[in-house]
Structure formats: structure tokens, C-alpha cells
Amino acid sequence: MKILLLLLLLWQPWSSSEAPQNYKKERKSLFNNTVLENPDYPLDCEVFQKRGHTTDGVYVIYPRGPNWPVPVYCDLSNDGGGWTVFQKRFDGSTDFYLDWHHYRDGFGQADKEYWLGLENLRLMTLKKKYKLRVDLITFNNKKVSTEYAEFSLSPYAINEGDDNYTLHVSGFQGGEAGDSLSNHNEQPFSTFDRDNDGHAQNCAEYTHGGFWYHSEGCFHANLNGCYGSRQVGCKDIIEKGISWQAWNITSTISFSQMKIKST
Ligand SMILES: *[C@@H]1O[C@H](CO)[C@@H](O)[C@H](O)[C@H]1NC(C)=O
Ligand SMILES: *[C@@H]1O[C@H](CO)[C@@H](O)[C@H](O)[C@H]1NC(C)=O
Ligand SMILES: *[C@@H]1O[C@H](CO)[C@@H](O)[C@H](O)[C@H]1NC(C)=O
């Protein structure tokens, strides 16, 4: 009994939610997008829009600092332009069933299918406030786009990956495809070799992707899942394919872009 009491007493300081709460408040007030951006080392695609570029394509940004150029695909034509595309799929040429290091650092090629990388996204969303846009097209050419007013990774983590790139997404803006991402809010990222989904199954393995999977049925959106059924392990396409469950479609998704723009 004494030992139990002692344990309870010891437990208290750590289980207190005071510290993180204050930290959240602190960060909000510090965070007002007046970041001093060195024009030689752009943080995101907005710079190119401001310089008058209107052609979608590959540009170079420096979210990790001057010594680390990162090729990025900029959407400078849709919805006012200035969108930094961090996920792009359209032909199944890039395998998205990859491990933690690939998802953290990025993979593929910006002019083809690619993933910009969780660490780049974290650093960008640490410096500015962003909104998220998801564009999807089906094989029979049905198109939708969905927006969320706020998007950031690890908003309360102090060090790189401390919370496994926890997704913060909120402010669904409506639209035909419905909301399949809010259910993933506050979920850490999972890959087959780092299972953080809280589900009995390894969701990344099960769906053949990497995402902010959650404990109830793994996902509502699975945009990094199998592209078509030709890849190894992708036969039962309904479970593993690129999906956005709230969208009432009969065809499969053939095109997906996730992109952010500062607000
Ligand atoms: C934003 O932050 C900067 C620097 O911390 C400060 O000078 C500026 O007044 C703030 N702007 C607003 C609108 O709060
Ligand atoms: C981050 O992921 C690792 C590996 O899956 C896990 O051991 C660790 O507990 C996770 N950290 C948090 C804060 O979720
Ligand atoms: C989904 O689409 C089918 C076919 O177009 C339609 O019959 C059905 O009512 C739709 N369901 C919802 C929930 O919108």
C-alpha cells in the first residue's frame, strides 16, 4: 500500500497537463507569420509566386537552411498559386511503400511522383502558418479539391521527430469529397518499421503505405497507399489503394496532390 502511494505521488508531476498547455499558449502568441525569410533561400513556393512565376514545376527551397537545397514541386496556377506540393501521385511509377527514413527525408523526384519529407514539412510549418489543400482525380476523371484552414506537423514538439510528426489539421472547408482527414488529427506518423497507430494491426503494412494512421480501422484517408493493383502486395485494392473514404466514388483515385500555402 505504501509503495502504491509512493508511486502515485511520483507519478503526479509527470501526468500533469499544465506544462504542455502553457507551452501551447506561448507558441500561439509567438507565431504570427512575420518570419524574416531570406529571399535567396526560400522556405516555400510562395516566393516564386511573388516573383511573378506562374508555371507549375520544380523549384528549389531551403526549409533546412542554406546548405540544404530541396527540390520541390510548386503549384503556381491553381487557386491563386503559391502552393507547395508535398505529395504527388499520378502514374504509380514511384513506390510509396517505404520505411521511416524515406518518409522523414522525402523520396521520389519532384518532377515525377514524390513525397517532400516530414522533416521539411515540420520545419516549414514551424516557421509559418499553413492551410492544406488536397486535390484528387479518379480514373474516370471526377475531380475534387478539399481544403483545411490549418495544417502543421509536430506543432508542440521541441526536437525533430519528438512526437513522430504528429499531424495537426483542422478547419475543414466543406466540399464534395467530404472530410476524411480530421479523423487523423493529432495522430503520429506510421511506417511499416515504426508502427505508432495504436491499432492491433500494423496499418502501414496492411495498407501498403505510410500515413498518420489511427486506431479505429487504420484510416479514413489513405493517400500514400497502393497505386493500382500491379505493385507487389497490392492485389486487394479496396483495402490498400489510395483512398478518401468520405468521397462517394465508384472509380479508383488516379491522381493525388497534397499541398500547403501560408495563411
Ligand atoms: C508579430 O511578431 C513580430 C516579432 O515578434 C512583432 O514585431 C509584430 O508586432 C507581431 N505582429 C502582430 C500582428 O502581432
Ligand atoms: C515515436 O515512435 C517510436 C517508434 O515507433 C516509439 O517508440 C515512440 O514511443 C514514439 N514516440 C511518441 C512520442 O509517440
Ligand atoms: C453515392 O453515389 C451513388 C451513385 O451515384 C448514389 O446512388 C448514392 O446515393 C450516393 N450516396 C451518398 C451517400 O451520397
Image (spheres, rainbow, N blue to C red):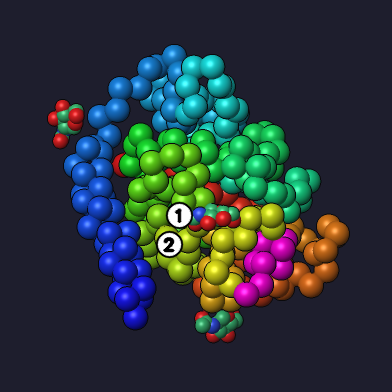
For disc 1, the marked residue is 167
Pointer 2 or 1: first along the chain: 1
Query: Residue at coordinates 31% horizontally, 63% vertically from top-left?
Result: 10
Horizontally, residue 170 falls left or right of residue 68, namely left
Q: Amino acid at mark 1?
A: Leu
**Image quadrant, ligand 2:** bottom right
For disc 2, the marked residue is 185
| Residue 123 on the magenta segment | no
Labelled pair 2, 1 in contact (Cβ < 8 Å): yes
Q: Nearer the viewer, residue 173 or 206?
A: 206
| Residue 203 on the magenta segment | yes
Query: Residue at coordinates 61% horizontally, 53% vertically from top-left?
Result: 256
**Where the C terminus falls, by quadrant?**
top left
Horizontally, residue 51 falls left or right of residue 223, namely left
Q: Amino acid at mark 2?
A: Asn
Which corner quadrant of the image does residue 226 belong to?
bottom right
